[in-house]
Amino acid sequence: EIVLTQSPGTLSLSPGERATLSCRASQSVSGSYLAWYQQKPGQAPRLLIYGASSRATGIPDRFSGSGSGTDFTLTISRLEPEDFAVFYCQQYGSSPYTFGQGTKLEFK
Amino acid sequence: EVQLVQSGAEVKKPGESLKISCKGSGYSFTSYWIGWVRQTPGKGLEWMGIIYPGDSDTRYSPSFQGQVTISADKSISTAYLQWSSLKASDTAMYYCARVRSDFDYWGQGTLVTVSS
């Protein structure tokens, strides 16, 4: 199975700053079938990005995804207070459709 | 509006059986796969398996094959996750999600606690 490793484990930033989150796969993710999810405490995950770079419905354009093969990035251009949460990547190109362990984005 | 509504929290003893549910609405239930995801503090999010309610085609993660059963009743737009004999290690939050390839809509989660 494909193992996804996210870094950093925790990212401490302030509103208005830029956030860059990394997701590295143990083998190439076919078709760039990679998604990013945001999860806030007590809530289900929410789809942000699919196909490595396409924003899901209703997701603000400050969220962007990039990458291919084994290296993927989620960028939040200017952090808003509501963006602080845990972010997960998921590959769905090869069963089982594994998740990364998450990056916690916290207030500095 | 697409919605997935899951059944409520459960507290069970080891060895007991359990079936939790996920009811879809606001879309054609038989046209999308439904997936199940386990979340624990120690292991994060784990993809358990998926089912296509249109024909009940089911795929399991090797980690969960034989440990759980995924099923669906398309007449009532509901998918299920069941255990025949629970273990303490099954204690977790369980989510269902609509599968487009990614998981685009999620249920609110069902907390399962297994304790003697």
Image (cartoon, coloured by chain):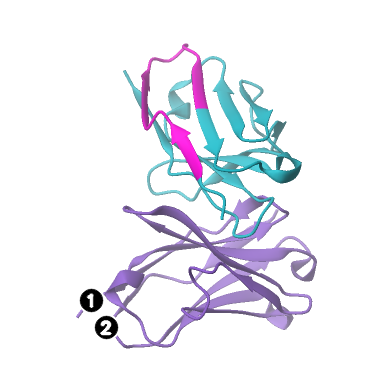
Instruction: Provide the chain ID for the residue under circle 1.
Output: B
Label 1: which secondary element: loop
Nearest to the observer: residue A77 or residue A27: A27
Percent from the top left, x then y, of residue B16?
34, 88
**Residue A59: quarter of image:** top right
Q: Is residue B68 magenta?
A: no
Q: Residue at x 32, y 52 (%)?
A: B41
**Which residue is label 1 attached to?**
B115
- Asked whether residue A48 is in view, the answer is yes
Measured from the top left, where is residue B38 in percent x and y?
45, 61
Who is closer to the viewer here, B30 or B52? Answer: B52
Considering every residue shown, the one lying at the far top of the view is A16
Which mark is on residue A20?
Answer: none
Camera-nearest residue between B53 and A100: A100
Specify whether B28 is left or right of B81: right
Cβ atoms at labels 1 and 2 below 8 Å apart: yes
Q: Which chain is cyan?
A: A
Give the purple chain's letter. Answer: B
What is the span of residues highlighted in magenta in the rendered image? A4-21
**Could you tell whether A44 is left or right of B49 in the image?**
left
The picture quadrant where one finds residue B58 is: bottom right
Labels 1 and 2 positioned on one and the same chain:
yes
According to the image, label 2 marks what residue? B13
Residue A61 percent location from the top left of the image? 66, 22
Please say if B105 is above or below B63.
Answer: above
* Quadrant occupied by the N terminus of chain A: bottom right
